[in-house]
Image: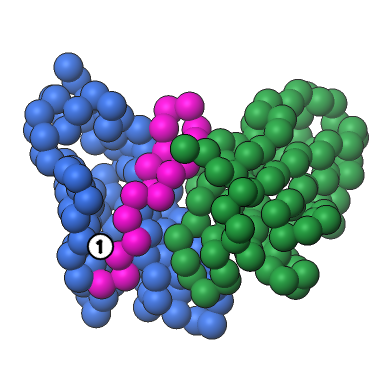
Chain colours: A green, B blue
Amino acid sequence: ETAVFQTPNYHVTQVGNEVSFNCKQTLGHDTMYWYKQDSKKLLKIMFSYNNKQLIVNETVPRRFSPQSSDKAHLNLRIKSVEPEDSAVYLCASSRDNSGNTLYFGEGSRLIVV
Amino acid sequence: GQQVQQSPASLVLQEGENAELQCNFSSTATQLQWFYQSPGGSLVSLLSNPSGTKHTGRLTSTTVTKERRSSLHISSSQTTDSGTYLCAIVPGTGSNRLTFGKGTKFSLIP
């Protein structure tokens, strides 16, 4: 049963446009994450957000920014998309940030043309 | 280099056979999880097993922490088991982030 909800599931856009992906978790978890899965299927963490503390992976370009209104929501905004941003973006949550089991959403596939 | 290495990269078996997936990691791991990613892309956690042996249904995971390896055994595989199996660790370096391997793509022949 899905408890981490992502929208949209699929988005096609042109280079330079702005894109936002939304994520909501109904598990009452304290920590949320955004992962990027590239064409080689490798999952890499982009951001984690716990108790209003944002931890950023330093390899993430600055055009990416997370946005959170409360601990159940963590959105991902891409200010000006580039072709290499084409990927699947996966949102996840965990009870806290001590390495507990992660629960993932179904992913948001972005295609930049 | 890659912190988490999985083998084989792909595996094709006939329905009913047993599958053995391997995960090796280059640093100590305070947490280790196995995930299943369906052909449609959704990711679910299968087992959390930082050490020892754990069972759930037809799945058995054995992690030997000091040898930095874990295995996932799927017994009597079924066509619904087809998909990608991902191993992920939380490195014991002060970070609490899961680091993923590239996965094993598992396909079943009916």
Task: Tell which of A72 and A83 is nearer to you.
Answer: A72
Q: Residue A96, located in which quarter of the rendered image?
A: bottom right
Q: Residue at x 14, y 25 (%)?
A: B15
The C terminus of chain A, quarter of image: top right
Q: Describe the element under mark 1 as helix, strand or loop.
A: strand
Is residue A61 among what the camera can see?
Answer: no
Q: Residue at x 85, y 51 (%)?
A: A63
Q: Position of residue A87 (x, y in %)?
A: 64, 37
> Looking at the image, is A93 positioned above or below residue A42?
below
Q: Residue at x 61, y 58 (%)?
A: A28
Q: Is residue A91 left or right of residue B87?
A: right
Start-end of magenta stretch: B35-51
Q: Position of residue B102 (x, y in %)?
A: 42, 48
Q: Which residue is mark 1?
A: B70
Whether the magenta-drawn stretch holds residue B46 is answered as: yes
Q: Position of residue A5 (x, y in %)?
A: 63, 39
> Looking at the image, is A6 positioned above or below residue A35?
above
Q: Residue at x 26, y 45 (%)?
A: B8
Q: Is residue B21 left or right of residue A103?
A: left
Task: Tell which of B86 and A86 is nearer to you.
Answer: B86
